[in-house]
Amino acid sequence: MANIPPKKFVEPIPNAQVGTPAVPPPPEHLSEKERMMQGYPYQTWDPELVEGRRNAHEMNRRFNETPSDAVVQRREIINSYLHPDCKDRPSIHIEPPFRCDYGYNVRVGNNFYANWDCAILDSAMVDIGDDCLLAPGVHMYTATHPLDPFPRRDAGTSTYYELAFPIKIGNTCWIGGRSVICPGVTIGDNVVVGAGSVVTKDVPSNVVVAGNPAKIIRYLDGAEVPPHIANKNKK
């Protein structure tokens, strides 16, 4: 059988849905961090990114080792490594253990509460609105990999390429325990995500979703109900 040469790595065009450029600029003009932030394939073992993760993981450790009554100390740690906008939010409460990869890409609104064991892989921005609640064990992943095995790994090396797409969550949302929010997902306002759900697609405002993959199971007041659903309910 003839040897089949590996496919040449072809850099995919970033996902236009998340607002990235349609035509990639020359790679040599971007650092790996810039590539990560703009939705292009990047190498996670770049020294700048490794240092960023080490810093965040150290801050995670410090935060998670604080005593239960160290409210002021926890807030000081949060202010030191989450997105700078968080400093202006007077009410942010996160229960340890909490983990994130970089910290500076996590931006939460006021009156935010995250229960135990939440994790955010924030290679891209994670924007969470005001008055949001995360139940225990909620995970949010902006990081992903190319689906095609050839561009996922640099041929002949141990280098893997990663991609990152932002997550956005609106105001007054409640994310149920052990739910997973996948890369590139936008969730509207007043959404409830049932426990154990895996949210793979955008969610409109004023609905309850549940399941794997998560689907709409209820429309709340103010929801835009599709005509076929509205007409069915009138019968």
Image (cartoon, rainbow, N blue to C red):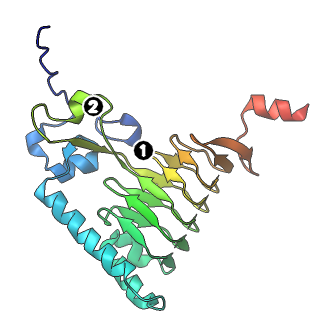
Which of marks 1 and 2 precedes in the sequence? Answer: 2
Q: Quadrant of residue 15?
A: top left
- Count residues near mark 2 (Cα–Cα under 10 Å), then give few for <14, some for 14-19, many for 20+: some
Q: Is residue 31 left or right of residue 229?
A: left
The residue under the point 50% across, 71% down is 116
User: 20 and 105: which one is in front?
Assistant: 105
Q: Which residue is depicted at the point 20% across and 41% down?
A: 160
Q: Position of residue 114 (x, y in %)?
A: 52, 70
The answer to whether residue 130 of the structure is visible from this angle is yes
- The amino acid type found where label 1 is placed reads Gly
Q: Residue at x 32, y 81 (%)?
A: 62
- The alpha-carbon separation of the residues under discs 2 and 1 comes to 15 Å
Looking at this view, is 206 or 175 the one in front? 175
Image height of 86 relative to 74, above or below = above
Residue 32 point in image, percent of width and height: 16, 49
Tell which residue pokes out farthest to the right in this image: 235
> Which quadrant: the C terminus?
top right
Label 1: which secondary element: loop
Residue 12 visible: no
On the image, numbered disc 2 is attached to which residue?
A: 13
Displayed quadrant of residue 170? bottom right
Q: Residues within 10 Å of mark 1 (few under 14, many from 20)?
A: many
Q: Is residue 103 left or right of residue 140?
A: left
Q: Residue at x 41, y 65 (%)?
A: 107
Q: Position of residue 176 (x, y in %)?
A: 60, 59
Check disc 2 and give the amino acid type: Ile
Residue carrying label 1 = 184
Rendering quarter of residue 192 = bottom right
Q: Is residue 203 left or right of residue 33?
A: right
